[in-house]
Amino acid sequence: MNRDVLVKLNYLLLAILLIGASLVIRHAESPERLIAGDWVETDWRLEKDNASPVEELQVQSGLKKEILRNVEDLHLGIWRFEKDGSLKSPSSAKSDSIEWFIKGRGHVLELRRDGRTIESFQIQQINDRKLVLHLNFDLQVKGIIEIVLERKEYSNQYAEKI
C-alpha cells in the first residue's frame, strides 16, 4: 500500500475513535443526570461500627435532626435535586437554596450553602429508581448512617396500582 493511503487510513481510524468516544460519553448515564429530580426518603439506618455483629437500627427523628442540623430543608423527607445544581424542598418557604455537587469519580455528593460545605455523603448506589447515601459521622458513637431514597414517581407507584 501507498504511504499516503496508510496515513489517511490512520486519520480516519482516529476520527472514528474520537467520534465514538464522544458519543458514548454524551449518552452514558452520569450521576449528575441520574440524581436530578424528586427523591423520597424511604429508610434511615445506623450501622454501628463498635458492635460485634453489625447492628442496623432505625434512626430516631431526634438523631436525624442532630445529624442534619445545618440542612433543615431535608427534614421533610423529600429531596428535590434541580438540574441547575440546587437542592430544594417542595414545601420549604426559604428563598436560599442548598447547592449540590458530585465530586470525585461520581461517588461523593457534597451539599453547600453560601459556598460553604455543610454536608458530604458517599453515594453507595445510584440508578433511575434508587439512591443510597452513606454519611460518616461521629456523635458519641462510631458508625455509618445509610439514607435510602427512592425516586418520587416510583415510590407512589405501588399505592397507585392497588
Image (tube, helix red, strand yellow):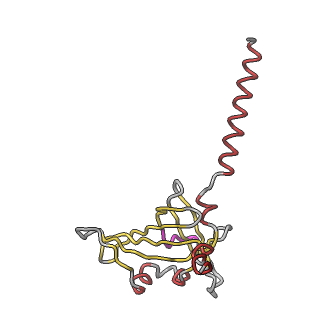
Dominant SS in magenta: strand
Horizontal and vertical percent for residue 88? 62, 78
Locate the N terminus by quadrant. Answer: top right
Horizontal and vertical percent for residue 110? 52, 66
Which residue reaches farthest left?
Answer: 52
| Residue 133 falls within the magenta-colored stretch | no
> What is the quadrant of residue 73 in the picture?
bottom right
Left or right of residue 148, residue 53 in this image: left
Residue 89 vertical position relative to residue 37 in the rendered view, above or below: below
Residue 81 vertical position relative to residue 12 in the rendered view, above or below: below
Q: Nearer the viewer, residue 128 or 6?
A: 128
Which residue is found at the position 46% from the left and 82% from the top? 69
Residue 35 vertical position relative to residue 20 in the rendered view, above or below: below
Locate the C terminus by quadrant. Answer: bottom right
Left or right of residue 142, residue 5 in this image: right
Residue extent of the magenta highlight: 115-120
Which residue is found at the position 55% from the left and 72% from the top? 150
Horizontal and vertical percent for residue 54? 29, 68
> What is the quadrant of residue 3 in the picture?
top right
Horizontal and vertical percent for residue 138? 34, 73
